[in-house]
Image: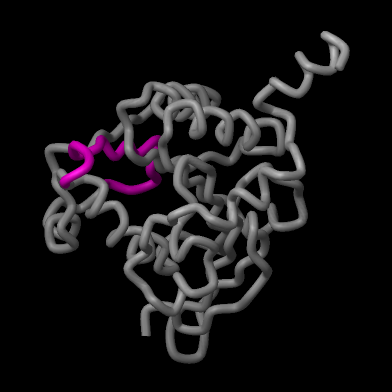
Amino acid sequence: MSDALEALLKNPRIWRGQTQAEDLNWQGLASGYPRLDQHLPGGGWPKHALTEILLDHYGTGELQLLMPALASLSQPQEDREAGWIAWIAPPFEPYPPALMQWGVNLSRVLIVRPKKPQESLWAAEQALSSGNCAAVLLWSTRLDDAASRRLQLAAETGQSWAIAFRSLAASSQPSAAALRIRLEAGATGTDIGILKSRGGRPAVVRDYAG
């Protein structure tokens, strides 16, 4: 093998065929919703990767969807310490009593409000790659394919879970996210459309919390 080819294959941005097969054996982070977990490879959220949540407007059940997993990450476990949960540029003020009710350890929650919109992506990358955050939530209107690749790489580097919230209009745009889901109000609750799942298949989960 030539030195140039060997160097190229070592680049973390290069996808190799066997990677997807290996990912089929990953242990996912349980979402807390069995109806959803059965559609996700590994039985839960993809660890150390980017998840994109597409929605028409905030308040479609996106935080309820994440709370069980975030609560688990914020608490110490036998094999790990409690992780930091960073919220980057949330469009609202998180409500501490509600977080506590879900079991989130408030002492492990960080709220970051960049002065400029373009600083949000930088803050998310730094938090993800630091190795100190178990999860990083990002609200940004500037996310594109290149930015998603940077977040995916940062999540892998810091072994953190990245969650980015985007508009439904972004569903037609390419993304490096390991998982892309769409949230919509259904007849009896919130429906989840799995648009892209590394190692899995597209699916629709009706009333995921039911």
Residue located farthest toward the bottom when viewing the structure as drawn: 187
Which residue does the image show at 21% across and 45% down from the upper left? 74
Q: Which residues are magenta?
A: 78-93
Residue located farthest toward the top when viewing the structure as drawn: 3
Residue 118 rendering spot, x and y as whole percentages: 55, 25
Residue 17 rendering spot, x and y as whole percentages: 76, 44
Which residue does the image show at 51% across and 84% down from the upper left? 206
Which residue does the image show at 43% across and 42% down from the upper left? 161
Q: Is residue 16 visible?
A: yes
Residue 101 rendering spot, x and y as whole percentages: 13, 63
Q: Is residue 183 left or right of residue 87?
A: right
Q: Main secondary structure of the magenta part?
A: loop
In magenta segment, residue 88: yes
Q: Is residue 115 visible?
A: no
Q: Quadrant of residue 200?
A: bottom right
In magenta segment, residue 161: no
Image quadrant in which the N terminus is located: top right
The total of numbered circles placed on residues is 0
Q: Is residue 103 above or below residue 113?
A: below
Q: Is residue 77 left or right of residue 46?
A: left
For this rendering, which residue is in front, 209 or 122? 209
